[in-house]
Amino acid sequence: MITLKEVKNKKDLKAFVKFPFTLYKDCEYWTPPIISQEMNTFNKNENPVFQDAEAQLFLAYKNNAIVGRIAAITNNLEIEDQNIKKMRFGWFDFIDDLEVSKILLDKVAEIGKSKNLEYTEGPVGFSNLDKVGVMTEGFDSTAPMVTWYNHAYYVKHYEAAGYEIEKSYSESRFPFENVKPEFFKKAQELIKRRYQLTALKFTKTSEVMPYVDKMFDLFNASYASLSSFVAINDIQKAYFKKKFISFVNPEYIKFVVDKNDELVGFAIVMPAFTTALKKMNGKLFPFGFRHILNAKKNSKDVIFYLIGIHPDYQNKGVHAVIFNEYYETFKEKGIQTCFRTPELEDNHAIHQIWKHFDPVVYKRRKTYKKLL
């Protein structure tokens, strides 16, 4: 018999966060999250997203053992301001037992109906800066820290529950040796002169901070047209600034400004922390920070986390300025492989940006939807 328990205290929350450590203990491709960070994600006193969102977490038990988990999420900005009547769900993990996945999904549907919502979609997080999608291809590749990993059997559980594909994403990679500067070197000089643009270089995180709020404003502007986009508000900006920026090498943050020092383009690249996270096994202390700092300094793989161009400057070659800056940085650091986070397969503009680097798609993932 399967029973559900709602997470109501710190002990249960820790069990919720740590369940994947059991589920994937024998999987070499799963990357452990940092337990304390995952706990803070659901801490209403830490994560400002809860000012505009709600989450109920559930654990499924069988024979007194945890066999599944799910987070039922509503984003009130999405529901009230955008009139998108969506019940979100994420952090959805389970053993290969259809009864387990069904009882968890049924609970999400029950909550969605009680709120008069129209459909459920997942796996997704609270916003576009969270992880997204269930993997459908690429199970023999290690998952970076910014994505979820899952067993191959997950897909059949969505299908058995009557869910249909809503969105499709791809993840790609390319060796740095594929980057040929002749594709952007001369173009970026011309573009900078034509539009009076300047590329900013940083060596300290403190130098980045004055521009971060503008970066999130530009993020909101450049991604607004994508489906399911929810803007980042001022309080969330401060949270993400604290949560993410310290993880990023300042030289991996590239901004392009106009003659008035207004931001027109940005990109954030992160070192690949996968090896470090595996060594840490979820724990920052006592030695986890050493692994993080070592990866930050010495990782030869990088992940393109975010890239955005102001709508007024899209299709004007600003990305060439950004790529030129990264080329010089990566060459100096001896970077070997560049990875990209999940991108919507129908986001043709972003795919065009990368075409000269001959990227190879190595993972695909989907979100699934069901009408209520």
Image (spheres, rainbow, N blue to C red):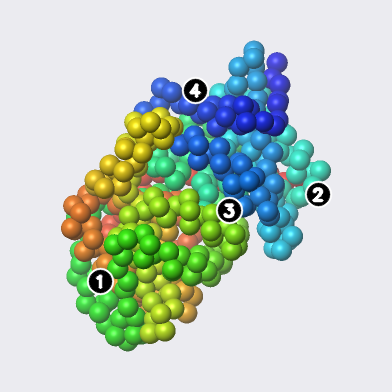
Q: What amino acid is found at the position of numbered circle 1 in the picture? A: Phe
* Cα–Cα span, label 2 and label 1: 51 Å
* Cα–Cα span, label 4 and label 3: 27 Å
Left or right: residue 191 compared with residue 68: left
Residue 363 location, x and y as percent? 40, 44
* Cα–Cα span, label 2 and label 3: 21 Å
Mark sitting on residue 22: 4
* Cα–Cα span, label 1 and label 3: 33 Å
| Residue 352 makes an appearance in the image | no
Q: In which quarter of the image is the N terminus?
A: top right
Q: What amino acid is found at the position of numbered circle 2 in the picture? A: Asn
Q: What element carries label 4?
A: helix
* Mark nearer the viewer, 1 or 3: 3
Give the residue number, with chain letter if any, for mark 1. 184
**Contact? badges 2 and 1 (CB < 8 Å):** no
Q: What amino acid is found at the position of numbered circle 3 in the picture? A: Ser
Q: Counting residues from the N terminus, which is met first, the one under dot 4 or under dot 3? A: 4
- Badge 2 crowding class, 10 Å Cα cut-off, few under 14, some 14 to 19, many 20 or more, is few
| Residue shown at 62% from the left, 52% from the top | 49
Q: What amino acid is found at the position of numbered circle 4 in the picture? A: Thr
Mark sitting on residue 116: 2
The image quadrant of residue 157 is top right
Give the residue number, with chain letter if any, for mark 3. 127
Q: Is mark 3 on a helix, strand or loop?
A: loop
* Mark nearer the viewer, 2 or 3: 3
Q: Counting residues from the N terminus, which is met first, the one under dot 1 or under dot 3? A: 3
Q: Counting residues from the N terminus, which is met first, the one under dot 4 or under dot 2? A: 4
Left or right: residue 206 compared with residue 3: left
Q: Is mark 1 on a helix, strand or loop?
A: loop
**Contact? badges 2 and 3 (CB < 8 Å):** no
The image quadrant of residue 205 is bottom left
